[in-house]
Amino acid sequence: MTFNANHPILFIFVGAIIALVLAQSFYFLFKSIKRAKQLGIAKETIKKTISASAIFTIAPAVAILVGVVALSKSLGIALPWLRLSVIGSITYETVAAGNALEAAGMSAATTITDPSIYITIAWVMTIGIAAGLILVPFATKKIQSGVNKIGMKDKKWGEIFNNAMFLGMISAFLGYVFCDVGAVISGDTSGLIPVCVMAVSAVVMAICGLTSARFKIKWLTDYALPMSLIIGMASAIPFNMLLGGN
């Protein structure tokens, strides 16, 4: 029997897991509404809060959809759908899957037909992101307490420390973007493709931020991420043609 990353049984398993997550979401939604009524919060306020939250979840949902589409060629739809719908992260999942595919001698454009490679990639994507579930309950309180103490003693150093942690996280992904730039020396310009795509995404993000601040368009800030992702991915097509990517 030939392995199929889009086999119906995979969608059944994934659908069952996501149905459970949705059931939990609805459970806490109804509990929250009940508690809000007990506190005497007006029905209009409750409805407005629910509708506003629902509308603004569309923005990250679009970004997640982009990730699913990007990974669906090699991994099918079921696995990316699961990984990016529960506790997945588009910035982590795509990099983890890409590294695992590269280690197997494949690329994101390759359709996986070997179940052992498929399972390996699934484990790589899952174990890495699951580390947060283990570390957060035990380490977050101590780390947050230490950061708060620094901020209380010296507000300036507290801000510097927070910014340093954020830049450290970003640097991990920047290394992935610039790792093949050195190949330009030997005449291979394909290593510039991710750099150019990142630059386009950054420009789109900056334009959205400046436009939102200048014209007071609040919703544009929420949709800046999916817009930069989609436009950045679209720009990869001409960059591939121009710079000789595969």
Image: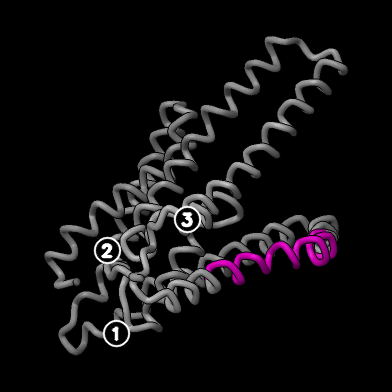
| Residue nearest the viewer, comparing 177 with 11 | 11
Any mark on residue 196, and which?
2
Q: Relative to 193, is 66 on the left or the right?
A: right
Residue at which label 1 appears: 182
Q: Mark 3 is on which residue type?
A: Ile
Please identify the quarter of the rendering in which residue 168 is found. bottom right
Q: Which image quadrant: the N terminus? A: bottom left
Q: Mark 2 is on which residue type?
A: Cys
Neighbourhood count class around disc 1 (C-alpha, 10 Å): few under 14, some 14–19, many 20 upward: few
| Secondary structure of the residue carrying numbered label 2 | helix
Q: Residue furthest front?
A: 1
Q: Residue furthest bottom?
A: 186
Residue at which label 3 appears: 9
Q: Relative to 23, is 200 on the left or the right?
A: left
Give coordinates of residue 128: x percent, y percent.
Answer: 60, 71
Residue range in magenta is 125-144
Are dots 2 and 1 in contact, CB under 8 Å? no
